[in-house]
Structures are given as C-alpha cells and as structure tokens.
Image (cartoon, rainbow, N blue to C red):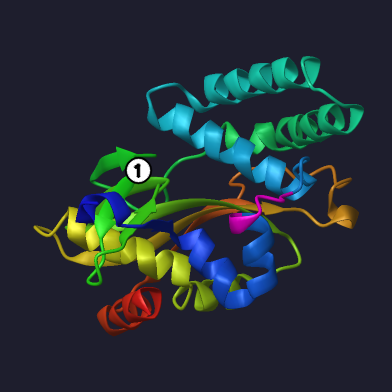
Amino acid sequence: MTEERWLKRVNISSIHDFIRCRKRWIYAWYLGRVPRIEGPALRFGHLLHQVFEAHLDGATMEDSISQVLRHVKLKARVAATREEENSWLQGGKELEYYAPVLKHWKDTYPIERTLEVEQPFDLPLPNGVRLIGRPDRMALLWGSVYHVQNRGLAGGVPLALYTELGMRNLHELGYAWAGKQKYPEYPYGGTIYNILRKLVLQNQKRQDKFKPPYNEIMGQKLVPMLSNRIEDAVNKIVY
C-alpha cells in the first residue's frame, strides 16, 4: 500500500469534539449516530450561511433571502417526517422574522477584496495528516487576510466574552493556520464575525426593534489571531 493510500484526513470540528468529549466523538464521527433532525438554532445558522453565500455570489441580500426561503419550502414539502418538516418551517420562519434587518446588511469594515467564498481546503499538517475545512469567506482587509465567519448569536450571550473566547477557539485558530498556508503572500489578521444578534423574547414584540441603523442586532466584530496562539493550536491539532 502506498503512503498516499493511508494518509488520513480530519476536519477541525472532529478534533474539537474529540477534545471536548471522547464519547461524543465516538458517536458522531465513528458510529455516525448524529441527530436526524437539526435543532432550531443549528437550522437557522445553516440558513444564515446560505443567505450570505448567495449574496457573495452576486445576488442582492433581498434576493438571497428569497432564494433560501424557496429552498426551505421545498425541503419542508419533501420532508420524510413531520419533525423534519417542522424543523425546516421553523428555521424559515425565523429567517423571515429577521429578513427586514438582513436586507440592509453591509460590511462594517472596509474590506478590500473577497478572496474566496465557501471554498474547501485540504492541507498537510507537519505530521502528514491532512486537515480539511471550508471557510465561510476569506477576504483582504488593510492588506491582511481575514476569515469572515457568519454567526447567529443568542441575545443573552455577552458579546465581549464571545469575542474574547474567539481568540482562543481551536476552530478559528485552525482556519487561521490554513489561511496562512493558502495566502503566504499576505500577513494573517484574524477573524471577522458577521453577527446577527437574536433578540431575547421580551424584545421581539417591541415596535422599534428593526429601526435603523440596526446596530443593536447586526454588525461585524474583528477578532485578531496571534501567531503564537495559531502555532500552539496547530501543535495541539497535530498531537
């Protein structure tokens, strides 16, 4: 058997699960026993990714939302179970709720150029194992490369704590390493989170919840990725 045949490929989500909980990793990545129905928060997050992907491919944000909502209705119509149908419909309902805000989305930071959108990478680690992943968007800002990550964030989560933890997040540090390998001609800056803050329930009935400039519930947050933390994360991934 040639070396190429037995080289392994692993993604960062798998490694993250392995570190957090070995039993979770065995069920999800070895036995393949994952929930058949996506939870509401995960479903909405995936739909949000699809909206941004369509938008960055050239569609207006309004058309992108309409396109994803049509996809939701189709998936709900052909769902195998009532639970799966409800999962799609609930995700679509939430996307419709925030559509008035998303239609006005624009980059907060002066991004110079988008380098790629949803392009997978497959790169060799120092131990020969290949790391795979799929960044949401890689872009140039102030001459440096940034991973632009789309996130729907619960209204009760402290933003300062979330971004502080983001600087230590193995997923983002691994993607930072991949960005440095793919674009060695540029310095690596960090992560820009596209954040949609989901309103807490008591605020969802406010009449002024969607008044401009919409800073309360959407915007971007820049999180730097330091070289020493990237190096430490890669060593951890290799180990």
Image quadrant in which you'd find residue 222:
bottom left
Q: In the image, 175: left or right of 197?
A: left
Which amino acid type corresponds to the residue marked 1 in the rendered image? Pro
Whether residue 211 appears in this view of the structure is: no
Query: Where the C terminus falls, by quadrant?
Result: bottom left
Residue at x 39% of width, y 80% of height: 236
The front one of 24 and 50 is 24
Residue at x 42% of width, y 65% of height: 172
The front one of 217 and 12 is 12
Q: Mark 1 points at which residue?
A: 120
34 in relation to 226, above or below? above
Query: What stretch of residues is rendered in magenta?
Result: 29-34
Where residue 120 appears, as percent x and y from the top left, is 35, 43
Residue at x 28% of width, y 41% of height: 114
Is 232 part of what is drawn in magenta? Answer: no
Where residue 174 appears, as percent x and y from the top left, is 37, 66
Where residue 40 appears, as percent x and y from the top left, is 78, 45
Image quadrant in which you'd find residue 73:
top right
Q: In the image, 145: left or right of 20?
A: left
